[in-house]
Amino acid sequence: MITGLEDIDVKALDDRVAVAGQIRADHVPAIAAAGFACVMMNRPAQEEYGQPDWGEIVAACEAAGIEARYVPMSDRASAMQALEGFRAALAEVDGPIFAFCRSGARCEILYRAALG
């Protein structure tokens, strides 16, 4: 459990990647404090009504000194681009990655595919 993220389900996939459901900008300081170097969103911005604004999360990442990456996957057409984006993050980010989507499932699928 990450202090400050008790209200969301975080799943560590390995020592480098954790996935979760939707976060808010006020979660970012806890994510940074836990040692993550990057927050990656794997859902399209404005996918559903009431979804936190990606721009606010990016601003919170900048304030916390960590990277923000937008790697959305919404359907089969965007899956290959998202897969390449996840692979790029694994290769380029120097430190642990915190990926999120609506439930965390999409992130885990992309992660597993990126490894294979």
Image (cartoon, helix red, strand yellow):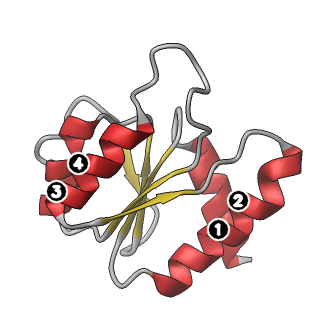
- Secondary structure, mark 1, is helix
**CA distance separating discs 1 and 3:** 23 Å
Seen in the picture, residue 87 relative to 78 is either above or below; the reply is: below
Front disc: 4 or 1: 4
Amino acid at pointer 3:
Ala
Please state which of residues 35 and 52 is positioned toward the viewer in this rendering. 52
Q: Which residue is mark 3?
A: 63
SS state under label 4: helix
Q: Position of residue 95 (x, y in %)?
A: 33, 80
Q: Secondary structure at mark 3?
A: helix
| Vertical arrangement, residue 82 with respect to residue 25, above or below | below
User: Residue 23 sits in which quadrant?
Assistant: top left
The reply to whether discs 1 and 2 touch (Cβ–Cβ < 8 Å) is yes
Cα distance in 3D space between marks 4 and 1? 21 Å
| Residue at 54% over, 86% down | 91
Position in image of residue 30 (x %, y %): 15, 50
Please report the residue visible at 22 percent of the width from the left and 54 percent of the height from the top. 31
Report the mark closest to the observer, 4 or 2. 4
Q: Amino acid at mark 1?
A: Gly
Q: Quadrant of the C terminus?
A: bottom right
For marks 3 and 2, the one nearer the N-term is: 3
In-image side of 84 versus 75 (left or right):
left
Q: Earlier in the sequence, mark 1 or mark 3?
A: 3
Asked if disc 4 and disc 3 are in contact, CB closer than 8 Å, the reply is yes
> Looking at the picture, which amino acid does disc 4 mark?
Ala
User: Residue tagged by mark 1?
Assistant: 85
